[in-house]
Amino acid sequence: MPAQEPQRKSGATHAPIGKVIEISGGGSKIEIDGARLRELGNDPDPSVAMSGQVGSQVKLRAGKRWILANVRTLQVADSSGDNIVAEIDFLGEGDEDEKTGELTNFKRGITGYPIPGDKVLPVAGSDLKQMFAASEQAHIEIGTVYPTKDVRGALYIDAMLGKHFALLGSTGTGKSTSAALILHRICELAPEGHIVMIDPHGEYSAAFKGYGELFNVDNLQMPYWLMNFEEHCEVILTSSGADRQADADILAKCLLQARSKNRAAEGMTKLTVDSPVPYLLSDLTGAITNEMGLLNKATDTAPFMRLKSKLDELKTDPRYSFMFSGMLVADSMASFISKIFRLPASGKPISIVDVSGVPSDITSVVVAVLSRLVFDYAIWSRNEAQRPVLLVCEEAHRYIPADKTSSGQAVRKILERIAKEGRKYGVSLGLITQRPSDLAEGVLSQCGTIIAMRLNNDRDQAFVKSAMPEGARGFLDVIPALRNRECIVCGEGVSIPIRVAFDDLERDRRPASADPLFSELWKQSGDEQAMIGRVVKRWRSQSG
């Protein structure tokens, strides 16, 4: 082993633990003294105690610079077990302070490589503070960097939101609470922000009561005429194959006629079936009836009758009243955009749109309309003062599935487009999912920042690894070993990949996603008949 260097203060007090034996572009191999590694395990500094282990950091001296690297693998080099070979990935470099020997001015990426034979040293807590110290850029603190107790983990907001982000984790790992924590921190930093969250399970209303505006089927009042033609087809057309195309042709013609009757359409030279111009449902039904009256043979009425019966169902079924009520015919587009996008925010920068009460057959259309409004607003407001919008999509694999044959193609298309083009127009996308392998190919790779909690499924782990940058590979190998409410963060939102234990969130800011305690609840009894009566009443009336 190399001779021990003269002792310096703090970061350089520890003797080398090994040497560089092989160098390649993205990483290298080092040889570690097994006895020194076991000796370090008793060090009072948790960062030093972890140094050299898988997922931890080591530092290499190259001239007057310190190069920091992440340990990816460990392997015994001989039968004695005292020589260990480790594969490492380079993270970044910093200068060596001449007085203390400590790391200063740490930057991501390296400008020069070490040479075989160069010494490898453990990383101290003071080094990690330099590595993870948040710069002057706007940032939020979300937790503590592992294995330290006091080094704060920060996310750079502009980089994270500018290039989209994804929060991934198996069910039960604390994903919903972690999402609430990140969004609360963003709201505190930007009280005049514009965040729209799609909440499929009604979990997040409890977390943002008093901090944001809460919408559900009782107060959403989303006008049906905001749908474009493709979304109309998903809601109204019930046929398939050749019949579907015939129905679509009739709907397109009649929808254009209905839209053109509105005063807002007067003087519009480019009115199309996609134009968000209000129309009366009765005008659409009337146009279909008129077209049917022009037929030569009564046997051709089937497509018209299918359209009319579906429209009648939408008008009369109370479950659809939040969208297809006759009260929503007024031109409320400006006020709807204002309330959903928080323009102005008035100190409540987030809208929680709870779609758990929306009938399952049109949930994807509701999400499609909201997502498309975000994107279209960004496109048509390019000449105005910029107001970027963050769209957060929980259970993202439902809306951007890998299966291209599933229903709900409108929402898939718009979310894929936002993932690819949104940042040009000031639209940020946040995806939350427990099944990243079920996401459409390419969407995850569009997310510049990936926050990965524990993933138990092999396919999901492989999928995330393929989307992560090369330098994060060593971190990704520990994903199955993460504890609840721990994550690996890598990408644009952090200077280097980090493992973070999330902060605790106040009880009144947590989502309603706690698991039931069977052992406790199954010891309780009483009032079952009255309870069932109340449930049946709500069930039948379809209201809470």
Image (cartoon, rainbow, N blue to C red):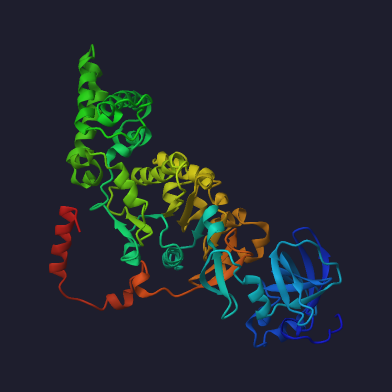
Residue 139: x and y in percent read 53, 65
Left or right placement of residue 322 versus residue 9 in this view = left
Q: Nearer the viewer, residue 112 or 388?
A: 388
Q: Is residue 213 above or below residue 301?
A: below
Residue at x 23%, y 14% (from the top left corner) = 295
Quarter of the image with the C terminus in it:
bottom left
The percent coordinates of residue 70 (x first, y second) are: 69, 68
Residue under the point 24% across and 24% down? 304
Is the residue 385 above or below the residue 195 in the image? above
Residue 370: % across, % down: 37, 46
- How many numbered tags mark residues here? 0
Q: Position of residue 387 (x, y in %)?
A: 44, 50
- Do we see residue 262 in this rendering? yes
Q: Quadrant of the N terminus?
A: bottom right
Q: Residue at x 30, y 58 (%)?
A: 214
Left of 237 or right of it: where is 3?
Answer: right
Is residue 76 at all visible to an observer of this figure?
Answer: no
Q: Is residue 148 above or below residue 415?
A: below
User: Between 82 and 39, which is closer to the camera in this rendering?
Assistant: 39
Residue at image location 32% in from the left, 44% down from the top: 334
